[in-house]
Image (spheres, helix red, strand yellow):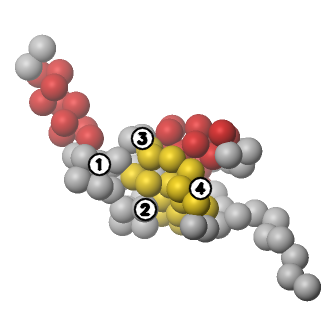
Amino acid sequence: MTHPTEHPHVVVHPPALDGSRRVTSGDETLGIASHVDDVGEILRLADLYVTDVADSDLIEWEGGGPDDWPGLSEHHEHRTSGE
């Protein structure tokens, strides 16, 4: 008999073209994050309370770490500079 995993494996996938990153646990998509704070909120909503998402063994960061959100900062700069 297999025992359920005490802590599920969470993956923050590589950034999409807009810089957002999909957050999954197994085959389930938990949400789409546009900032590292979003990852914490997505996990909280999934009843997975992680105090430090940037340094948690629970989370696997693919295609860059918690500081890598390419495209979003550039998009934000273009949007705010034109206002």
Q: CA distance from mark 2 to mark 4?
A: 16 Å
Residue at label 4? Answer: 55
Q: CA distance from mark 1 to mark 3?
A: 9 Å
Looking at the image, tell me whether mark 1 or mark 2 is earlier in sequence order.
Answer: 2
Tag 1's secondary structure? loop
Q: Are marks 3 and 4 in contact (CB under 8 Å)?
A: no
Q: Looking at the picture, which amino acid does disc 4 mark?
A: Asp
Q: Is residue 65 above or below residue 71?
A: below
Looking at the image, tell me whether mark 1 or mark 3 is earlier in sequence order.
Answer: 1
Looking at the image, tell me whether mark 2 or mark 3 is earlier in sequence order.
Answer: 2
Q: Position of residue 10 (x, y in %)?
A: 60, 62
Q: Residue furthest left?
A: 82
Q: Looking at the picture, which amino acid does disc 1 mark?
A: Gly
CA neighbours of label 3 inside 10 A, class few (<14), some (14 to 19), many (20+): some
Mark 2 vs mark 3: in front: 2
Residue at label 2? Answer: 13
Residue at label 3? Answer: 35
Q: Position of residue 19 (x, y in %)?
A: 29, 48
- Note whether residue 70 is visible: no
Q: Are marks 2 and 4 in contact (CB under 8 Å)?
A: no
